[in-house]
Image (tube, rainbow, N blue to C red):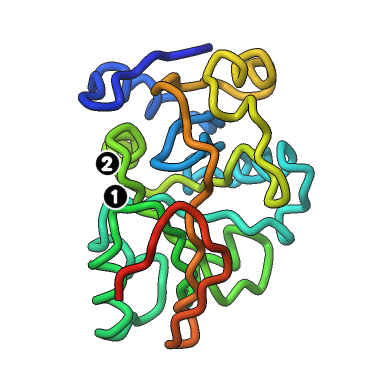
Amino acid sequence: MLIEINPESPDQRKIDEIAEILNKGGVIIYPTDTVYSFGCSLMHKRAIEKLAKLKGLKLKKANFSLICYDLSTLSEHTRYIDRPTYKILNKNLPGPFTFILPASSKIPKLFDSNKKTVGIRIPDSNIARAIVNTLGHPLVTTSLHSDDEILEYTTDPYQIQQNWENQVDAIIDGGFGKIEPSTVVDLSEGDVEIIRQGIGELLY
């Protein structure tokens, strides 16, 4: 199912429809401020397992991130964040970054692992943030492309539909996506380490 949503002013009825799919354990493909991504509800373990399967990974090996609405929800999913770290987050979010932060005790249970960190995203995307706001909790997310290669079809919603419509519950058409991924920044040890330089230029 392809659902067209205006990226500038998302139709709340369509956002509600997407949230209902996610609340039933569905997996979607949706636009962010970088590339198109898979997403599912943080509250559905089976959906998270399906996400791993779509990426050809075992759940405990998957490095999924959480899409949050704003910084106020971070304390539920991360351990204590010191003031310098918070200032960096506040300067750069919403934006095209994935920040690796110390994980709360909830995270290992969700991913059947002993993960001590979690990737957090607050994209500068009206559609993504509207979905999370309506859901009332984060999306578990992973980019549509592999880490090694961004395939051309990931930018075009209609090509995405042709490739994935039988494997996911909904695809959101929010226009053409970008071909550069987010910048990944590790803040888990207190220092700033850029793991992958993507579209985001970090402000200190």
CA distance separating discs 1 and 2: 6 Å
Mark 2 secondary-structure assignment: helix
Tell me if 61 is positioned left or right of 155 in this view. Answer: right
Image quadrant in which you'd find residue 153:
top right
Q: Which mark is residue 130?
A: none
Residue drawn at (52%, 19%) of the image:
157
> Pointer 1 and pointer 2: residues touching (CB < 8 Å)?
yes
Image quadrant occupied by the C terminus? bottom left
Residue 92 place in picture, x, y as percent: 29, 63
Assign a secondary structure to mark 1.
Answer: loop
Figure check: 101 above or below 156: below
Q: Is residue 132 left or right of residue 184?
A: left
Look at mark 1 in the image and give the residue it sits on: 69
Amino acid type at image mark 1: Tyr
Task: Work out whether 196 lies above or below 87.
Answer: above
Upstream in sequence: badge 1 or badge 2:
1
45 vs 105, left or right, is: right
The residue to which callout 2 is attached is 133
For label 2, the crowd category at 10 Å Cα-Cα, with few meaning under 14, some 14 to 19 and many 20 or more, is some
Which residue: 32% across, 39% down?
A: 125
